[in-house]
């Protein structure tokens, strides 16, 4: 390489992708946000309920489909936009400026992650029955792995189990915090089927469960900090499934789960960036509008520091997500980068929203702005798809291993050309 030459790191979008981002932004601002205000009853009007609510939401999905903004993460042959993960980042970051945005575009959790999983693991018959309607937006799904009796961050401890009885599998167990289970048409269920595998990670198997089903009982929707929103506790008692309902092979449940969670974690980060940017925008807007003790808040050093810290963190979040997404698109090992991004973005989201609430004062603590609702949701980010401490443990292990193997930690810090 000649003197003065450099390695280009270019995050400039292609004209085609820039055009898509513009259309997403326009759709969210002009159609989805006003509809969201109408649906939630902001202002003097009451919120929409029942059939009116459903009809309004479905109309938004029809508009997204008509505008060519449907299913950004899936291949064209499945009715999607065929975007890679870097391009998907800019779509998710625009869509999630509205609470309903990702759902309207059919790229919301947990369906988005389940689509990727089925695309990779499903048989042709399973894909036709489950993936096709999921892509069309006519069904809902859930991913049932977490259990109350064991640490959710260690799937090798799963106690829900299954045994084969002829052409059927009989499943028993207990799951909880299963997002979307209350309304799901099918579940991807992870249970232990191998008693003494060579590796602990080869004990679990995935099954597809049509819902409702005899033996699958929703005990309750668990109330959380932000209310009861479909995170369900499920009791599984002698649930019988034909062997054709197995997703992947015996003992591949852990592998399947990890394959699903990597890109899904990053998709969460993309949506969290949208929320963090919204909070920062609100923080700056409030600081320019609020007058106290001789000047507007924007002229006070304490407020400037909060704005500066938030801007720097958001910059880091965006770079980490884009770099991790580029590694996925390049078919490179992305586990470490996604793990670091997930931990950092989740914590930044909490800090930025908290600062925005502080700058708004009592108004930010009230429900007159979306900040209180955003903060309730943000706290979940620090343990969903892996608790902070588990990600820190894995990051440390990879950093130590990198030094042992290469005499430097370079490969554990993004393996960048610097």
Image: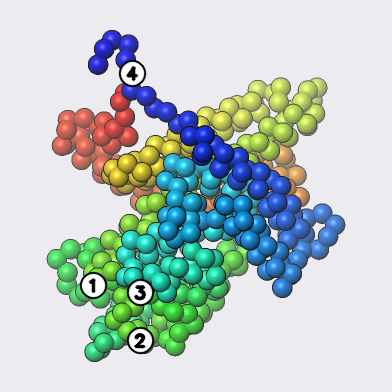
Q: Nearer the viewer, mark 4 or mark 1?
A: 4
Q: Nearer the viewer, mark 2 or mark 4?
A: 4
User: Which quadrant does the N terminus fall into?
Assistant: top left
Q: Nearer the viewer, residue 337 or 222?
A: 337
Q: How is the image coloured?
A: rainbow
The residue drawn where x is 33% and y is 23% is: 7
In three-dimensional space, the C-alpha distance between marks 1 and 3, rounded to whole angstroms, equals 18 Å
Specify whether residue 59 is in view.
yes
The residue drawn where x is 54% and y is 74% is: 182
Which secondary structure, mark 3?
A: helix
In three-dimensional space, the C-alpha distance between marks 1 and 2, rounded to whole angstroms, equals 16 Å
The mark nearer the N terminus, 1 or 3, is 3
- Could you tell me if the residues under marks 1 and 3 are in contact, i.e. CB atoms within 8 Å? no
Residue at numbered disc 4? 6
Residue at numbered disc 3? 125
Residue at numbered disc 2? 240
10 Å neighbourhood of mark 1: few (<14), some, or many (≥20)?
Answer: some
* Residue 23 placement (x, y as % from top left): 61, 44
10 Å neighbourhood of mark 3: few (<14), some, or many (≥20)?
Answer: few
Q: Nearer the viewer, residue 416 or 201?
A: 416
Q: Nearer the viewer, mark 1 or mark 3?
A: 3
Residue at numbered disc 1? 250
Left/right of residue 157 with respect to residue 385 in the rendered view:
left
């Amino acid at each position: 390489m000649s003197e003065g030459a450099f390695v280009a790191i270019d995050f400039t979008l292609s004209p085609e992708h820039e055009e898509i981002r513009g259309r997403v932004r326009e759709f969210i601002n002009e159609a989805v946000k006003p509809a969201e205000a109408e649906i939630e009853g902001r202002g003097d009007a009451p919120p929409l309920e029942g059939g009116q609510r459903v009809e309004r939401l479905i109309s938004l999905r029809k508009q997204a489909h008509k505008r060519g903004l449907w299913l950004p993460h899936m291949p064209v042959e499945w009715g999607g936009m065929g975007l890679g993960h870097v391009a998907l980042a800019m779509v998710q970051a625009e869509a999630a400026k509205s609470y309903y945005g990702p759902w309207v575009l059919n790229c919301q959790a947990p369906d988005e992650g389940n689509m990727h999983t089925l695309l990779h693991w499903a048989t042709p018959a399973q894909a036709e029955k489950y993936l096709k309607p999921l892509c069309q937006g006519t069904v809902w799904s859930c991913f049932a792995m977490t259990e109350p009796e064991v640490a959710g961050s260690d799937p090798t401890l799963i106690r829900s189990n299954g045994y084969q009885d002829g052409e059927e599998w009989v499943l028993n167990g207990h799951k909880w915090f299963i997002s979307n289970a209350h309304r799901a048409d099918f579940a991807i269920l992870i249970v232990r089927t191998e008693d003494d595998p060579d590796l602990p990670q080869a004990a679990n198997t995935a099954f597809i469960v049509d819902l409702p089903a005899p033996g699958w009982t929703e005990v309750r929707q668990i109330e959380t900090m932000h209310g009861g929103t479909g995170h369900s506790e499920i009791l599984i008692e002698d649930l019988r499934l034909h062997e054709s309902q197995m997703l992947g092979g015996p003992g591949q449940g852990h592998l399947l789960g990890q394959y699903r969670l990597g890109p899904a974690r990053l998709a969460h980060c993309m949506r969290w960036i949208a929320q963090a940017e919204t909070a920062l925008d609100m923080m700056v807007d409030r600081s320019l509008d609020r007058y106290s003790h001789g000047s507007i808040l924007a002229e006070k050093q304490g407020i400037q520091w909060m704005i500066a810290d938030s801007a720097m963190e958001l910059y880091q979040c965006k770079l980490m997500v884009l770099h991790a997404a580029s590694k996925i698109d390049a078919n490179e090992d992305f586990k470490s980068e996604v793990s670091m991004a997930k931990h950092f973005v989740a914590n930044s989201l909490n800090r930025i929203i908290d600062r925005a609430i502080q700058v708004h004062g009592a108004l930010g603590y009230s429900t007159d702005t979306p900040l209180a609702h955003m903060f309730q949701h943000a706290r979940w980010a620090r343990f969903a798809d892996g608790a902070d401490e588990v990600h820190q443990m894995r990051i440390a292990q990879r950093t130590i291993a990198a030094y042992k193997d290469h005499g430097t930690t370079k490969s554990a810090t993004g393996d960048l050309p610097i």
